[in-house]
Amino acid sequence: MTLLVTGANGFVGKALCREAMARDMLVRAAQRDPVSVQDDVDTVSVGAIHAQTPWAEALRDVRTVLHTAARVHVMHDPASDPLSAFRETNTNGTLHLARQAAQAGVRRFVFVSSIKVNGEHTTPGRRFSAHDSPAPQDPYGISKHEAEEGLRQIARETGLEVVIVRPPLVYGPGVKANFASLLRAVRRGLPLPLGAATDNQRSLVALDNLVDLLITCIDHAAAANQTFLVSDGEDLSTADLVRRMGKALGTPARLLPVPTSLLKLGATALGKGDVAQRLLGNLQVDIAHTRDTLGWAPPIGVDEGLRRAAAPQVSR
């Protein structure tokens, strides 16, 4: 039986297809445009994901769906109603796919959600847990939470096995956005005012670790109808992260010890308080439930994950 990967040309989806193929799984890649992920992958174009997306061809003979496709945060989002825009893809599109999957005889639906369902930050000494009451605060997190709730209802009604995975920030080869900008700054030897950011702790997850967990969830009997948090199993302060980026790049990071209170004040004055929170605040996740339920551990550590993220992407 076939494994269907949605968002197959995306950051997570492409790596997931590659690893599943390496493990001799029969993979079908679903994506918006008819462009092959790689030559030996069965690719199907489904167009935009919403409540009317045609899934019949993609779901033929599929046993498990790994749903990585999503509308994610973009700078200067033109949507006049961001929550409706996120709901259209992340909630309505996901639930439509799940209903179609159940009708097609799919056994398991693995959904890549987000730690934002738990909330935006943790207090010192506390970690997010898979058993916490959800507290999403932005349109993206709300849309993912609503998708989770809808999936659980579909599971109760149809018997479809649903597995939900909530990652924090994912980094790896081809990473973009703020993480990529930070890597570039360290590579160029630019001085960064983050030397005093030593008291916060943040959980991240290397792309290879996330992919390994998702593949574990395909067949593991104990994964059915569970929610799992995922991370590298080691939390970092912002200053430590930047130093270890430098180590991965072979270029010592240049850190200036600017007090974090001044950084937060300046960011707030510039209307960038949310950016400062993500950079300087706490966000820790507890993966004990994932470890205990699945017997799973991250296959690579932070330093190896950063080394892979920092490696030249000539062939990609």
Image (tube, rainbow, N blue to C red):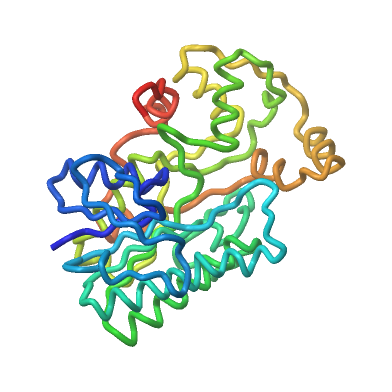
Which residue: 67% across, 53% down?
A: 77
Quadrant occupied by the C terminus: top left
In the rendered image of this protein, does residue 250 appear above or below residue 8?
Answer: above
Which residue: 57% across, 41% down?
A: 201
Which residue: 51% across, 56% down?
A: 115
- Residue 284: give x, y in percent of width and height: 53, 49
Q: Quadrant of residue 153?
A: bottom left
In the rendered image of this protein, does residue 242 appear above or below residue 272?
Answer: above
- Residue 300: give x, y in percent of width and height: 32, 35
Which residue: 37% across, 81% down?
A: 154
- Residue 274: give x, y in percent of width and height: 72, 48
- Residue 230: give x, y in percent of width and height: 40, 51
Q: Quadrant of residue 95?
A: bottom left
| Residue 112 or residue 94, whichever sits in front | 94
In the rendered image of this protein, does residue 152 appear above or below residue 241?
Answer: below
Quadrant occupied by the N terminus: bottom left
